[in-house]
Image: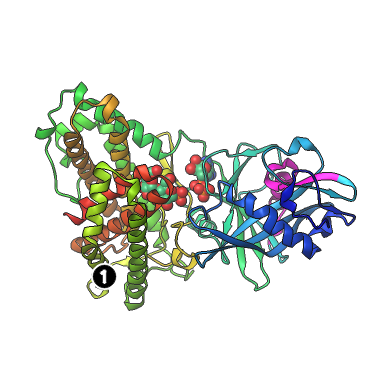
Amino acid sequence: MSNQSLKTSNQPIFKTEKPWETLLDNDKFVKAFLSDVLEDYIVQQRWYGGKSSNLKYIELVEYFRIQQHGEVYFGLILEVNFVEAFYQHYFLPIAFVTDENFVQEDKILPLYIEDQKGYIIDAVHLESFRKLVFERIATALPKDTTKVQYHKSHLFKDVTYESSRFMGLEQSNTSIVYNEKYVLKFFRRIFSDKNPDYEMSRFLSEKKEFKNTPAYLGSINLVDAANTNITLGLMQEMIPNDGDAWDYMLKELHKVFSNLEYKRINIAELPNTDLYQRLSISDIPPQIIDWAGLNLFSKIKTLALRTAEMHIALGSEFEETAFTPAHYNGDYTVWLKNKMLHQFQNRLNIVENNIYKLDGLALTLANEFLDKKNLIRKRFVDFDWTKLKGERIRVHGDYHLGQILVKDDDFYILDFEGEPESTIRDRKVKQPPLKDVAGLFRSFHYAIYANVFNNCEKHYNASFEDLFHASEILYRYITGLFLGTYVAEIQNANLNLGYNQERIFILKYCLLEKAVYELGYELNSRPKWAIIPLKGISNIINH
Ligand SMILES: Nc1ncnc2c1ncn2[C@@H]1O[C@H](COP(=O)(O)OP(=O)(O)O)[C@@H](O)[C@H]1O
Ligand SMILES: O=P(O)(O)O[C@H]1O[C@H](CO)[C@@H](O[C@H]2O[C@H](CO)[C@@H](O)[C@H](O)[C@H]2O)[C@H](O)[C@H]1O
């Protein structure tokens, strides 16, 4: 190998007489590739989750062949170490190509192999790689005992490769659409364990036949040196859809808020209701239905029903211990409080470090958050498991409107990877099902406020104060109707959510937890939105 740094040129400076198949056995190459090339490459990728921390160095934990009929690609497991004393693992499949046409912005490194000029690229950009992976899943044996194990469900039969393309959406992994019928998600950030998305998708759709999630079709798993099963890919049915519930909700809410003017509604005279009352549609006053429209409420009912059905399926297992319901206990309480206190301290730090980015109402609310830190901390510590009788189950964990697809008049739930900041073990801890409900309620709150902030100046004449007042009223009816539908359905199925006061306690606890989590997410990735969780926190702690 040339002694020059691989980074110094766009021209191929690395030459080897050895074939591509042995390139990664060359320690000098690997060392330079990791430090001179991959460090720059990885930080620019959409799927890289370490953007708010400082990369220290990358190690190659493991590599393996992904191959068929003499066609060889490598799967790399990279360990990214951070200055802040933690690490993350990533999966990067690579290919060597000599045709410039394959090398656009996805080029990783130009090099000569056996006198042939070519490039290392991310293999997912190569149709031949995508086809190979598809065929490996389609032809998987019932029990694959090799290192890279392909699995297919009974639903994935008689399939032949026709086409493949990038899903092309903003996402934290990389999804490929096959034959316009199937979606294969290559996990980018990976964990030394089965990915919860794989576990939950297979459990819900294969074992419990829950219809409102894409059917599980297959997966790719790596058995590492320690015999741990690591999920690299998940194949599911593709759900043709009309977009996600977040976009749907924003469109509906704009209509609702435009109605204020169009229908000459006097905001001050709108009837109100208590927070977290269980409502049915007949409890919603005619003035509110006239303002918001029956359609919005009937969609909320359907969503509540699907959410309840998901939890009923998740709470109905008696054999597979990863899914059997549990009760609250001392261990759970210690785990929860530690997690909450740690997360809260981290958020205080993020707010202190980023407060200069805020102004106006956001700044006022951030100061309130800092001033009331002891009160908030106390709320997190005040968790007494001896008073709680409900059950804990495996939950979605990152449940929000962006994870739900809308199709006709129904909803389909996706992406069971869990909360992005949590460790893999924490993501599998059984939690109150109301944690997901709180996630969705925060999302309703987000959508309502995002709509007001996006449109208030251009489209609505009412004052900020009045729009906030209308927002809170709408939030109360939407969440009340959701709770009424959800709780009734869950109780019919005998899943124990605890008594009424317990449910409200858990809901409020989880709402505060989620809003505090969101505050960090927003300040790190889109500070202009921090006002939404700040408003949410303020509402929660002042009620
Ligand atoms: N099975 C599917 N059918 C249709 N669209 C899907 C499917 N799976 C994912 N999508 C689309 O891709 C987006 C990203 O998927 P998601 O599972 O959330 O990926 P990530 O974990 O990378 O964020 C979803 O919001 C949805 O629009
Ligand atoms: O990318 P993920 O789906 O894993 O979730 C992360 O990003 C979400 C934003 O896309 C973030 O969700 C927050 O913003 C949503 C609106 O964009 C809102 O509906 C959610 O309620 C709110 O939490 C999510 O928190 C984060 O984990």
Q: Name the residue nearer the viewer: 138 or 271.
A: 271
Furthest residue to the top?
262
Instruction: Indicate yes or no whether the magenta region holds residue 488.
Output: no
Quick check: 80 above or below 180? below
- The quarter holding residue 56 reads bottom right
| Picture quarter with the C terminus | bottom left
Task: Read off the residue under disc 1.
Answer: 381
Q: Tell me which residue sits at (30%, 30%) in the image.
A: 455
Can I make out residue 305 in this image? no
Residue labelled 1 has its Cβ within 8 Å of some atom of ligand 2: no
Disc 1 element: helix
Residue 432 position in % (x across, y down): 33, 63
Q: Tell me which residue sits at (81%, 44%) in the image.
A: 118
Residue 53 position in % (x across, y down): 50, 57
Q: Tell me which residue sits at (66%, 54%) in the image.
A: 38
Q: Name the residue nearer the viewer: 152 or 274.
A: 274
Furthest residue to the left?
269
Q: Tell me which residue sits at (73%, 39%) in the image.
A: 103
Can I make out residue 458 in this image? yes
In the shown orientation, is residue 352 left or right of residue 123? left
Q: Name the residue nearer the viewer: 1 or 520.
A: 1
Residue 21 position in % (x across, y down): 83, 57
Residue 439 position in % (x across, y down): 34, 52
Q: Dot 1, how many residues are within 10 Å of its Cα: few (below 14), some (14-19), or many (20+)?
A: some
Instruction: Indicate yes or no whether the magenta region holds residue 123.
Output: yes
Which amino acid type is shown beneath numbered disc 1? Val
In the shown orientation, is residue 16 left or right of residue 130? right
In the shown orientation, is residue 319 left or right of residue 461? right
Magenta part of the chain? 117-142
| Picture quarter with the N terminus | bottom right
- The quarter holding residue 438 reads bottom left
